[in-house]
Image (cartoon, helix red, strand yellow):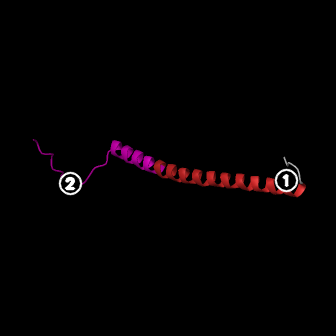
């Protein structure tokens, strides 16, 4: 099995290397944003469920006070 060539001297970044690095950083940022949006979506779904429960509770309270079916 052949051994990889030894590197001598400083690393040289080519345009391809810079493009690949930028793509990797962009992908990492998208993953971070996606994780944030998933968390935010879950929080908002909880808020909607809570508001729906509050709405139902208030509707029942109104029915009790008015004495007839509300809305």
Task: Tell me if label 1 and label 2 are in contact, CB under 8 Å.
Answer: no
Q: Measuring from the top left, give residue 24's x and y in whole percent.
A: 39, 47
Disc number lying in front (1 or 2) = 1
**Quadrant of the rendered structure where residue 15 is?**
top left
Q: Measuring from the top left, give residue 61's x and y in whole percent.
A: 81, 57
Kind of element beneath mark 1? helix
In the image, the segment drawn in magenta is 1-29
Query: Residue 57 or 22: which is nearer the viewer?
Result: 57
For residue 10, side relative to residue 19 (left or right): left
Q: Measuring from the top left, give residue 9's x and y in whole percent.
A: 20, 54
Residue furthest left in the image: 1
Could you say which disc has been placed on residue 19 in the image? none
Q: In this rendering, is residue 54 above or below 22?
A: below
Membership of 65 in magenta stretch:
no
Could you say which disc has been placed on residue 9 in the image? 2
Q: Earlier in the sequence, mark 1 or mark 2?
A: 2
Kind of element beneath mark 2? loop
For residue 43, side relative to residue 71 (left or right): left
What residue do we see at 42% from left, 50% from top? 25
Q: The N terminus appears in which quarter of the rendering?
A: top left
Query: Residue 49 or 62: which is nearer the viewer?
Result: 62
What residue do we see at 89% from left, 54% from top? 67
Q: Residues within 10 Å of mark 1 (few under 14, many from 20)?
A: some
What residue do we see at 87% from left, 58% from top? 65
Q: Residues within 10 Å of mark 2 (few under 14, many from 20)?
A: few
| Residue to which mark 1 is pinned | 63
């Amino acid at each position: 099995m052949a051994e990889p060539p030894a590197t001598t001297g400083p690393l040289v970044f080519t345009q391809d290397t810079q493009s690949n690095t930028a793509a990797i950083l962009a992908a990492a940022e998208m993953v971070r944003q996606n994780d944030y949006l998933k968390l935010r979506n879950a929080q908002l779904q909880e808020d909607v469920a809570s508001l729906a429960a509050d709405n139902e509770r208030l509707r029942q309270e109104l029915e009790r006070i008015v004495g007839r079916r509300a809305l």
